[in-house]
Image: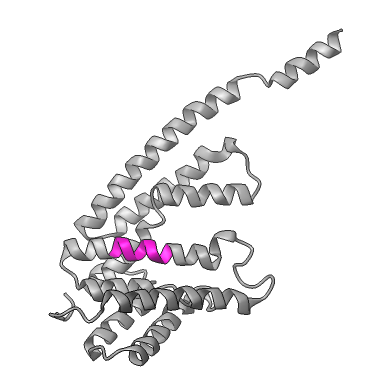
Amino acid sequence: MGIEIKESPISDEEFEAMQEFVHDYLAASVENEGEGGRMRWYPWHSAEYRFNHILNVVDIATKIARREGANEDVTRVAALFHDIAKLEAEQDLHAEAGARIAREYLVAHGDYPDSFVDQVCAAVEDHSYQGDLDDLSLETRCLIEADILDKVGANGTALMLLRMGYEARTHMDTAEMVERVIERGEDARERVVSDTADSLIHQRLKRTRWFQEWLEIEVAEMAAEEDPLDDVATGMGES
């Protein structure tokens, strides 16, 4: 359990200001990168995609924190800053860089308790941890579980379909690509520890499996049908 902070140190206005800062920081990271920079060749790694992902994680992490008894302010602020350095730092360094940015912001923009700042920065720095989540604070666990969950379910499926389009793959490959989302969800279910996260993953996997089943039926039907243009071509050859 995290250190209890009895009164919320973050007002709605302060949180909105933090959101604006994170949005602008991501946008500046892309602008400073120039053409052909790291990750620019995947459209969903744009500043707008990354910011939307962050907001999704904030929402999910706050929900998990509320149900699991974690400190909601620590969790949601850490979620807001967790990927702020994603577009400018190397993957294995972005969590540490994000924690540094979060500390600089919190120290400069408010009289927040040291314990609050330390907990937020620890959660940001540890959000890429690949070990047992029971080794971490409850707030960090909520953040990691939310980060995992955003890539599972309908949202994860949509991202995979975006990837298909970018790679010029056809709809005939869709069921295979959705299977990857399901596999990711199964792996996630093995990793999360909270009942809330497990319940959310179960719900999202159920939706994804339903979508995959629907796809498999329709794609099989399309594959079994002859292309009408082939019939026309055959008829012209016989005349």
Q: Residue at x 53, y 39 (%)?
A: 174
- Depicted 216 relative to depicted 228: above or below: below
Judge left or right: residue 231 versus residue 92: right
Q: Position of residue 186 (x, y in %)?
A: 35, 50
The N terminus is located in which quarter? bottom left
Residue 32 occupies quadrant: bottom right
Residue 115 occupies quadrant: bottom left
Q: Residue at x 42, y 82 (%)?
A: 96
Judge left or right: residue 19 versus residue 11: right
- Depicted 11 relative to depicted 233: above or below: below
Q: How many marks?
A: 0
Judge left or right: residue 235 versus residue 154: right
The magenta stretch is 53-61
Q: Main secondary structure of the magenta part?
A: helix
Q: Position of residue 200 (x, y in %)?
A: 27, 51
Q: Position of residue 224 (x, y in %)?
A: 59, 21
- Depicted 15 relative to depicted 169: above or below: below
Which colour assignment does the render follow? one colour
Q: Is residue 37 visible?
A: yes
- Depicted 70 relative to depicted 181: above or below: below
Q: Residue furthest top?
A: 239
Q: Residue at x 66, y 19 (%)?
A: 226
Q: Position of residue 8 (x, y in %)?
A: 19, 78
The C terminus is located in which quarter? top right
Q: Residue at x 37, y 51 (%)?
A: 185
Is residue 90 shown in magenta?
no
Q: Residue furthest front?
A: 13
Residue 182 vs residue 44, the one in the foreground: 44
